[in-house]
Each structure stands twice: as structure tokens, then as C-alpha cells.
Amino acid sequence: MTTWPQGPLGQRYTIWDGTQWVDVTGDVRTVENTVTTRGRPDEASQPTPGRCAFHINNRDGRYTPRNHRSDLYGLIGRNTPMRHEVRGPAPYLLVPDLAGARARVASTSALNISGDLDVRVDAALDRVAAQDPVLTPFAPFAQEVIARYNVTGNARMWRLLISSLGSPVLTWSTTGADLKELAATEVLPVAAGERFGLRVTFDVDNGAGGHTARFFIARDLDGPWQELGLPVTGSGTTSINTTGTADLEIGDIASIGFSRGPGRYYRAQIRSGIDGTVLASPVFSSQITGTTSFSDSAGRTWLISGGSEITDYYQRFSGEIPSWPPRWDVSGTDVWTGLEATGPRRRLSQGQKALKSTLSRRVPSYSPVAYWPMEEAREATQGYSPIEGVTPLAATGLSWAADDTLPGSSALPTINAGATMRGAVPAPTGAPTSWHTEFVARLDSAPATYRTVIRYQSTGTIADWWIQLQTGIARVQGYDADGSLVVDQAVGIGSDVYDGRWNRWLFYASQSGGTVSWTIRWLYVGSGGGSFSSSYTGTLGRITGVSSPPAWHSDLAGIAIGHIAVFAPQQLDAFEAADDGFAGEAATIRMRRLAQEERLPLNVTGAAANAAAMGPQRPAPLLALLDECAAADGGLLTERRTGIAQEYQIRRLRYNRRPALQLDYAAGHIAPPLEPVDDDLDVRNDVTRTRRGGSSARAVLETGTLSVQDPPAGIGLYDEAVELNVARDDQLEGLAWWRLHLTTVNETRYPKVTLNLRNPASQAWLQEYLDRVDIGARITIANPPQWLPADPIDLIVQAYTETVNEYDWTVELTCTPASPWTVATTAPDAPTATSPPHRADTLLSTLAAPATAAATTLSVATDTAAGGYTWTTNAAHFPFGIVAGGEPMTVTGITGTSSPQTFNVTRTPAWAADHNPGEPVHLAPPAPAIGL
């Protein structure tokens, strides 16, 4: 184990040359400061690009990209990836994102478990909800963690994975060939790079005719364990296969083929039976750095391979170097390059081009034979085709860009009397036995007689298909090459087709023997619609062209039309959901979809059911679309520290987080300056939230210290109005009140909390800092100085600046109050070690009698007539904190079930004071009394 913090601070700088990480630490001027900044200024802002600035010697021109004498010539340049690492107090197993990177124990019968199983892992994963850029580019994928599982030789036994949503999943086999699994009902409430303990217990015979898996989470393997979601039960008893050979593996599981499990691993345990015999128990944090093989306390020999290593270097920044500017002194003897690596948001924000409409992005991915979006600007004379080899759509008399009301499209043209269009459709590959045509249209009123909206030319028995409309009827007519009518079918349609709503019109056919079956289908964009099918004897042929009638009739003037597509074979879901811009899509699903479409590294954690429902996705730059998802949902979008990627956690995963770091001012954990600020910078006491294209909701703080009332009753008006892209108007009220809740916290801001990580006092908590503190983490500071309020300081880290050189390492945290994120949740009637009591504040409680600074009991009255509730006397709920007259106290017991009640309390002498009757008594900290 490293002796720390004696001597120079160990650092490591590496750059990626296209095939491997190159260590350039020897050239970096580590005597000078490396300054890293990450995060955002406040709760409402999106993150700014992270930055890591340092200097590197360049006397030999090695770091001049265009210097052909450099060994890095052609390997470095714009946006070269880099990493900065600093040595910490304890080692761990580093599993990089490489094939074969793992720790393993060779297969042995001593690891066989056929009955109950208990698996525990202490790790910090580089990604929690995984994306895999290799298997299916940037698609969500299950992530490997630990397993005895070999798909060959009937050696499937068991495996513990993380699902693509971030939920733990236990998979097992009873025979070695079959596959069964149970998944946790909740996702892991941790961020990428945050250390946590994960445990699954598997009861193969739960005594009720079934089997049960239970999932738990803790800070590490020492617990205490808190159950993650509900027990998950399957029917029938079961067992775990013990035949065949399967190594015990951590990291990249050799034969599974899912997303690898990169990250830091500290410990693991495999037990036969729940809390049973330990069969394997590696403690990677007790090994010497560089160790490649060791035996654990259970006698298992662990092999470290595939690029994995036991190391004590902790990654502090991962980014891209956009430029390599050489600098030198006047003598030319000192030459250096000042480098500033940045996070991916800097690059993504450069020259942001708006993404096209959802229809024009989605439809080409279904390989149409021909497609014309018709989203041209007003002066257009033809319709562009995004499909290679397809000529533009010839058109006359259209009013281009006249209708912008279809959510999934940019503005489309409307028809004028006498307008025409025609497009040639090339032959499809092969000889498909089906085709499918589709377009969108909006009609304000129905023509009084049959009018042709669109025609399709074909090589089959029917050479010319005519799609016609009149009041309450759609008609399909098909003519052969001689002009004879082969199909003449009228279909009743609802009058609401003509009420100004958008419709998708599908016409498709398929060949079976000598019969051609055809269908006309109309779908209201959003929901509803109808269809009619029929058939004729003949040949299908292929679509060769799309056209208007010789000239559109004046009855059709004003119809908006667009997104004309032809598919062979059929692709009936090509337009699905994209026509309304994916309205109603969960924020998490939209972010994952955008990331996959744009090949963007972005890990999204959180169940769709718990995320905000989004409004239509309109054309906008990629970052703007991601940011509007985060704004609507209220979660945390950040850049990852352990990879050039972004990550998002939904708002609900941020509730009631345990402190990542618990500091003590009196113990010297805080370095100067500690700069609390009581100001109005983040105050918003009159909040309006508006749905794009919809209604509004308003939340106002009418009374209290930060209310809209004039001083001294309040603070005056601080208003805010923000438009959000949410799906429904009824979402707005909760969002407005939540924002008001965040911005009217009557607490001190801490824009600068300074930590000296080289101070000997930091050794008590440095490992916790490295393992758990990142943007969004909660920290507490006990025993603040007496010139500050007595309450412990409870904060959320919004940003930080780390400054490192050979001998110094300091961090300045930008923080906001954590109390808004403590929310009320339900709890079982009988609290347990894994399900602690959840408390909500009672109302209208005050001191009923005076109390001296030395008093250990308080008389507390509650006005039950006005709606207050008396306090609990259940022994299982003690101890808990209160604030009485501004002084924090700990309640160890309460006697009496009616008001007034007697509280037994312990107090901190430094904060003890005399109190008078009528002073308020509250739970510390109270949960917000708002609708979430």
C-alpha cells in the first residue's frame, strides 16, 4: 500500500496515439499547476465543458503535431484524447474497457454452488447504465460485472449484470444450457465512477413454492445493506448448474459478449448460502501495486490479465486536446506547450447544426427505395431526395414551407390549384414480393366530389393507382396499361380526417401466388385511424413513380402534403412515432435514442416511468435537444470523469442521497477560505413554467423570509418564466413548484469550500473523496465555527476546481444547499436494518415551557386542533434530529401521546442556549411539503 501523502505527489499523464495510451508524464511540468475545472454554476444550469490545463516541455518538438521528426508525428493533433491521474492512498483493481480485461479464478469444483447464492461486489463502474460502441454502435447494452458463466460446454452457471437501464440482473442456468433471470425493480442510484457495494442473494427454494432474488446496495461491502427495490420472485423451486467448467471472472466475462464492465474494483465475495460459507473473497485494495497474481482468504488464486492492473492511480480528468500551441522564451532554450484538454461538450458545441426533423431522420434509416421529405424553403423549385440515386421531386405551383404544424417535420408545402408534382422511383434491389407507399397530409375540409390526391405508377397488372378523397369517403382506383379500370373501391372514412389534423396515408400491397392483396390505411398523427383491404388477380410489379393528377383541382387547394416515401419490401413502422416528433417519449428514452442516432457516448440512468414525458422533438442542435430533456426532467447532465462521454441521471435518483463525504470543521478538514454567502443570487420566488405551444403554471412564495412580500416581511419579487418542452399541460404545476422549492431555500450558499488534500488531516477522508465525490455528490461539514449557524452544513457539489502540482493538491467546491433534495417517501411499518424509518415533519409544534442551556428534557406542545400531529413514541424510530429554537438537538425518546409531550434530548455544549416558550420545534431536516 502506498505511503501517502509523504514525498512528491505522484501524477500520471497519458495521451492516446490511436492504438494505445502513451505515458508523457516525464515531459509534463509537474512543478507547475495542473488546473481542472468541472461542473455547473447552479442547479438550473447545464454543465460547462470541463477543462484541464497544464504545461509540457517541448524542447525537442515532440509535441508539435506537424514536426515530422517527432515520434508522435501523425499521431497527435486536434482533439487527441488525454487522461490525468493522481496517486491515492489505496490501490484497487483497474479494469479498462478492453477485451479480455479481467480478474479470474480458474474453474474448480470448490466454487460450485447448486443451492442458495450470495454475491457481493465493491466497485466504482466507469459507466452504470451501459452503452457499447463496439457491439452495436452506441446502443444501450447489458454490462458484465461478475460471473461463473461459459456459454460453451454447458457451463452456464450464474452471472451478475447491470441492465441497459442501470438495474442489477441475476442470470442463472439449471442445466448449463437453459437461461433464467431475475432483475431488480429499481436502478442503481449511483453515478459513473462512484463507489458502491452491490449484493444479490438468491434463495432457490423460498419455502412458498418459488425462488427469490433480493438486491442490496451499500457504501461498500461493510454495509449496512439497504434493499434495492422489492424482492423478485419466480414460480417453482430451482437450482444452479454445477457441471462443466466456468472460471470465476470479474470485469470482461470471456464468453458472454455483452458490454464490458470497466471500472475500479476493491473487493468481492462469493458465498454458498445466504450469509453462508465464503468460497472466494478477493481484497484488491490490500494488494501491492503491480501484483498480477495473489491468493485470497478462501484460498483462491486470482490472476490479473488483459490490461487489468492493481494500481493506486485515480483518474481526475479525461478529455480532448484541441490544440498544441508551442511557446518559447526569447533565447529559444526554454520551449513548452501550454495544453488545455476539454470535455466533449466543447467540441459538440462548435458550429452546432440543427438536427433535421424526426421524420426526415428516421425514414431514411428504413432503406426506402425513394423518399422526398418536401421540407424545402419558400423559394424552392423541387423536392430534395436524401436517398442516393433518386432524382429530386419535380414540382410546380406549390407554396413551399407554408405549414409548420406537423410536430415531426419542418415546414411543408401546401397545394395550389393547378399545381403538379412527379418523382421517379428506381428499381429496388432483388425481387421483393411487397411494396409500401406513404405520405402525410392535412386537410381542413373535404372536397364535395372525388378528387385525386396522389397517384402511384407500377409495372404490375395495375399500371396506375389513384388515391381519391371526398366527403366521408376515400376511393382507390387501379387502371391497367390500357386504361381499363381493374380496382374501384370506395371506403368510408370519418369526417375527422378533414378537421385540420394531420394524417398518414399508407397504401401497400403484396403478392401471394396469383393474388395481389392491397390495403389503404389512414392514421391520425397521434392516435386513431382506420384501414380497408382487398385483393385482385394479377401481378404486383413495382412502383416506378409518384405523381399528382395532371393538375391538382382547386377543391384541394390548401392541403399540406409531404414525406412521400416508397419501400420495397414493406416497412410499415418506418414513420411510427416520428410523425408527431416522438411526443410523449420519456426524457431518458429520447436521450438514449439521440445518442444512438448521433453515435454520441452518453450513459443514461433511470427508469422511463420515472422520467418526464417530453413534447415533440423539433429541429435543434444535438446539445440543445439533450439540454431540453434535462431541463424538463430536472435531472443531472454531466461530463464523465472516467471517459470522454456524458452521463445523465434522472431527478428521482438524486433524492435522499447519503453523504458522499462527511467532513468536520473542528478536526481541520476544511482549509481557508470557507466563504458562505447569504445573498439573493439563486432566489426565484415567482416561478412560471410554460409548455411549448401549450399552457402555463405559476408557483409563488406568498409568505416567509424569501417571499414576494416587501422587506422585512419578505425579500421582494424575484420572478422567472421558462418554456419547457414537456408533453402535457398537467406536468407544469409540479415542475413550477419544484423549481420554487429549489430556489427559495432559506439557507446560506457556499460558492467556495476549500479542501487541502495534502493536509495530514485529509488522510481520514481522502479515499472517500476519490471514491465518491463528483458533480452532484452530497457532502456535510460537522461542527462549523461558532460565528456560523449551528446546523451542520449540508451541501450538493455543483462544480469544482482542482489544482495539483508536485507537492500541493487543493480543491475548491462550488456548492448549493442539499436540503431541497431530502424528500418524503413511504416506509414499512416496522423499520429494519435494511429498511430504515422514513420521517416526515409534524406541524405546529413549539416549546411548551422554558428550557435552560443545560436541560436534557423539553416540553413540546403541538396544536392538534389546527391540524398538527403529535410526535412518534415508537422506539424503533429513535434517535433522530430536531431543531428547537434554532438549536440542533438529538431526540433519544419521547413520552406521552398527547400534547404536550416530553422529549429526552442530547445537546452539543458549544451550541446549547436558553430557550423560551413558543419557540418552534421542527424535524431536522424536514422533507418538503410539496407535490413532486
Image (spheres, helix red, strand yellow):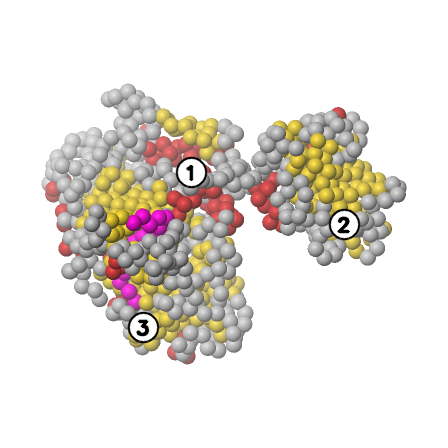
Q: Which residue: 77% across, 31% down?
A: 551
Q: Secondary structure at mark 2?
A: loop
Q: Position of residue 602 (x, y in %)?
A: 44, 50
- Residue type at mark 3: give it: Thr
Q: Nearer the viewer, residue 875 or 344?
A: 344
* Mark 2 / mark 1, whichever is N-terminal: 2
Q: Residues within 10 Å of mark 3 (few under 14, many from 20)?
A: some
- Residue type at mark 2: give it: Arg
Q: Which residue: 57% across, 41% down?
A: 358
- Residue type at mark 1: give it: Ala
Residue under numbered circle 3: 292
Q: Which residues are magenta?
A: 310-326
Q: In the rendered structure, find residue 631 and report the number of the disc placed on it.
A: 1
Q: Position of residue 696 (x, y in %)?
A: 47, 28
Q: Secondary structure at mark 1?
A: helix
* Mark 3 / mark 2, whichever is N-terminal: 3
Residue 588 visible in the current orientation: yes
